[in-house]
Image (tube, rainbow, N blue to C red):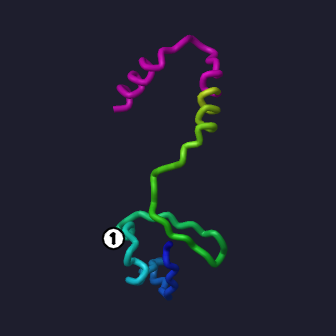
Amino acid sequence: MDQIIQVTGFIRQRGQLTLPDVIRQGAYWISVNSPVTLIRTKIDEIIIRPYSLKKTLSWEEFYERVKKIRAFKGGGKSVNLSKFIVKDRETHF
């Protein structure tokens, strides 16, 4: 189980907070210039977590989006999606 540690820190100019050594020790994800996610849960509480690009995938939401895309009927001519993507990529460089 994770140990709860409470220490006092100070907010410096430009809102900078230096994390005390005792907090940084054992936190593998805390290093110089490491991105973090800040979550203000209450007016007097902030949670700091390692930034993660991973987003939980909701398969229900995914399939709903696929259904919407498949149900879309264009008003114009039929288009080959692969050719459209290739042409789009070629014109943006």
- The residue sitting at the top extreme is 77
Number of marks: 1
Q: What amino acid is at disc 1?
A: Val
Measured along the vertical axis of the image, is residue 59 above or below residue 29?
above
Examine the image and state in which quarter residue 34 appears: bottom left
91 vs 84, nearest the viewer: 84
10 vs 89, nearest the viewer: 10
The structure residue drawn at horizontal position 61% and vertical position 22%, both measured from the top left corner, is 70
* Residue 84 point in image, percent of width and height: 45, 20
The structure residue drawn at horizontal position 45% and vertical position 79%, both measured from the top left corner, is 17
Q: Which residue is mark 1?
A: 32
26 vs 54, nearest the viewer: 26
Q: Answer left or right for 93 relative to 43.
A: left
* Residue 41 point in image, percent of width and height: 63, 69
* Residue 25 point in image, percent of width and height: 37, 78
Indicate whether residue 62 is drawn in magenta: no
Q: Which residues are magenta?
A: 68-93
